[in-house]
Image: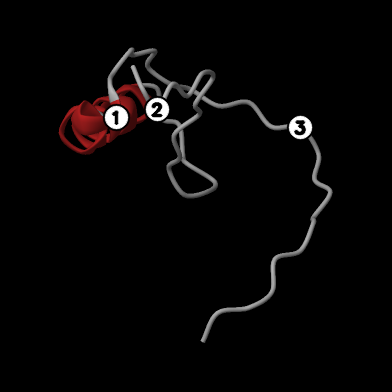
Amino acid sequence: MLTEPNLQHRAEQPYVGIRSRVTMPEMSTTLPPLFREVYAWLSERRGNPVGPPFFRCRVVDMSG
């Protein structure tokens, strides 16, 4: 069962990521493997994720 959306105010927290430019059709094949790369980087530095992985989309161009 889905719940209603709600807002949660949280303190800032740093994150690590890999910048990539992809088209909409490429997203499902290009981006998920990058999670392994991020987790490997964190592991090498003894970092522990504190939340689920996410994609940060700075620009969304549905036609491009």
Residue 13 pos. (x, y %): 69, 32
Q: Which residue is mark 1?
A: 24
User: Who's the residue at 53% across and 48% down the image?
Assistant: 51
Q: Do the numbered discs 1 and 3 sit on residues whose CB atoms are within 8 Å? A: no
Q: Work out how far the residue at label 1 is from the one at label 3, CA to CA, in angstroms.
A: 29 Å
Q: Work out how far the residue at label 1 is from the one at label 2, CA to CA, in angstroms.
A: 7 Å
Q: Which mark is residue 62?
A: 2
Q: Which residue is mark 3?
A: 12
57 and 47: which one is in front? 57
- Helix, strand or loop at label 1? It is helix
The amino acid sitting under disc 1 is: Met
Report the side of 13 relative to 26 (left or right): right
User: Who's the residue at 49% across and 26% down the image?
Assistant: 57
Residue 33 pos. (x, y %): 19, 33
Q: Earlier in the sequence, mark 1 or mark 3?
A: 3
**Mark 3 Cα-neighbour bin, 10 Å: few <14, some 14–19, many ≥20:** few
Report the side of 33 relative to 61 (left or right): left
**Mark 1 Cα-neighbour bin, 10 Å: few <14, some 14–19, many ≥20:** few
The amino acid sitting under disc 3 is: Glu
Q: Which mark is residue 59?
A: none
The amino acid sitting under disc 2 is: Met
* Position of 6 relative to 28 (above/below): below
Q: Earlier in the sequence, mark 2 or mark 3?
A: 3
- Helix, strand or loop at label 2? It is loop
User: Who's the residue at 25% across and 27% down the image?
Assistant: 34
